[in-house]
Amino acid sequence: MTAITYTDVTKRFKGANMNAVDHVSFSVEAGEMVMLVGTSGSGKTTLMKMMNRLYTADSGTVSLFGEDIAKKDPVALRLSIGYVIQQIGLFPHMTVYDNIATVPKLLKWNKEKIAARVEELLKLVNLDPKEFYRRYPAQLSGGQQQRIGLARALAADPAVMLLDEPFGAIDAINRRNLQDELLRIHQKDQKTYLFVTHDITEAVKLGSRLLIMHEGKVQQYDTPEEILKHPANEFVASLMEGVT
Amino acid sequence: MYAIFAYFSNNMSNYTAAVGEHITISAIAVLVALVIGVPLGVAASKNRLVGGVITGAFSTLRIIPSLAVLLLCIPIFGVGVLPSVVALSFLAIPPVLINTVLAFTSLPAPAIETANAMGMKPLRVFWLVKLPLSLPFILAGVKTAVVEVISSATLAAYIGAGGLGAIIFTGIGLMRTDLLLIGGVSVAILSLLSGFLLGKLENSLTRWKRGAV
């Protein structure tokens, strides 16, 4: 089943002299983890943010399970999409519990169901519920904060997860652990992930397929093995040299 | 010293009435400042130009001495409690307003972005995220306003609003040091006490800011 389809999507920001995203088409099967890879300014984040309508495409369509997202209510759409960013964006005034419970509360789940779900999620991201429920984000390390960010995004069992350089600000050791855990979580939940990164090693490690972006255009879209063996052009080849 | 004891034994009801008036006038003025200052601050934070004009105007108004504002209110509102409350509100709005603008322009962008991206409607983002995160700043403004209003409310006695100022002015008129002391020290205690209580409130509302468990 196809989860996500971008068809000829173009986006240009006001005052810019080139398209941030330039006639991009690709599709993602349900359960895939697709890595959007490129240098800064390549359009990868812009591309991702058109999925939950933080940005609107100038032309082209983005659809989710066959439905054009432009025709959906943005609030309902976003409630069904998990979102994790590099700066994490936890609510500093809320406890870990309330942060994770955000979307379930918006969806008006009952208290017991929310409590059970929060406990389940904390275990999933390897944090002891009893120890962490009542803590505030300021009382967590960066790695712990991003675990909570991930748990919060997964809370209401979204069909699609969007991750924008989620481990970019985390030290190397913790980053590796989080990557391993994300792989484990993905194997378990089989959700569809769009994962933006500029770290080609991370992309090869995590991705079922990589979408390589440069100057708003797709350079290559294939499995990591295939791209490593047959880079489509000079740019992709030089990018893949960074794989360790 | 004896005179002070004598005052309290003979005039306790007058004294408590004066304290009551003082607190009432101050509280109303601060409430009015909150009702006007916070929404205006939120509006001002949305647009740099509007924000600059509004904060500039109120900062300028703030320079006018409290007594002058009080006296200027007489031709419009007459004498008594009403002009005092109006004048004191004018005094209390700038710190509340300026801190509200500051709070709302320094909100953490990633938290707001994720709030939107998770499907919170704008009104929810305001009540659940923006306002609670702004509270410490706003409260700091309120603290400044309260201390300023309590001391300036002393002058309100000049235009017949009563309060602890009345005791002080009587003391000046009769050249009685005991009354001056009673009035002056009471105002000082009142303003220290309210600063302390608001500090407590601020602490309990901002537990999330402290790093350690």
Image (cartoon, coloured by chain):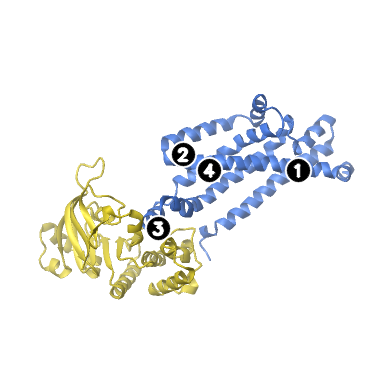
Chain colours: A yellow, B blue
Q: CA distance from mark 3 to mark 4?
A: 25 Å
Q: Say whether residue B93 is left or right of residue A9.
A: right
Res A183 → quadrant: bottom left
Q: Report the residue at 63% width, 34% height from top.
A: B86
Discs 2, 3: same chain: no
Nearest the viewer among B39 and A109 is A109
Residue A58 screen position, x and y as percent? 22, 47
- The kind of residue on which mark 4 rests is Val
Q: Earlier in the sequence, mark 2 or mark 1?
A: 1
Residue A112, image x, y percentages: 48, 72
What chain is tagged by disc 1? B
Q: Which residue is mark 1?
A: B19
Q: Amino acid at mark 2?
A: Ala
Q: Is residue A50 visible?
A: no
User: The residue marked by circle 2 belongs to what chain?
Assistant: B
Tell me the kind of residue under disc 1.
Answer: Val
Which of marks 4 and 2 precedes in the sequence? Answer: 4
Name the residue that disc number 2 marks.
Answer: B44
> Mark 3 sits on what residue?
A89
> Which is nearer the N-term, disc 4 or disc 1?
1
Q: Are marks 2 and 1 in contact (CB under 8 Å)?
A: no
* Disc 2 to disc 3, C-alpha distance: 25 Å
Separation (CA) of disc 2 from disc 1: 36 Å
- Left or right: residue B23 versus residue B91 is right
- What's under tag 3, amino acid-wise? Gly
Front-most of B180 and A58?
A58
Q: Which mark is residue B38?
A: 4
Q: Quadrant of residue B206?
A: bottom right
Circle 1 residues within 10 Å: few <14, some 14–19, many ≥20: some
Instruction: Judge from the rendering whether residue B172 lies leftward or rightward of residue A95; answer left or right.
Output: right
| Label 2 SS | helix
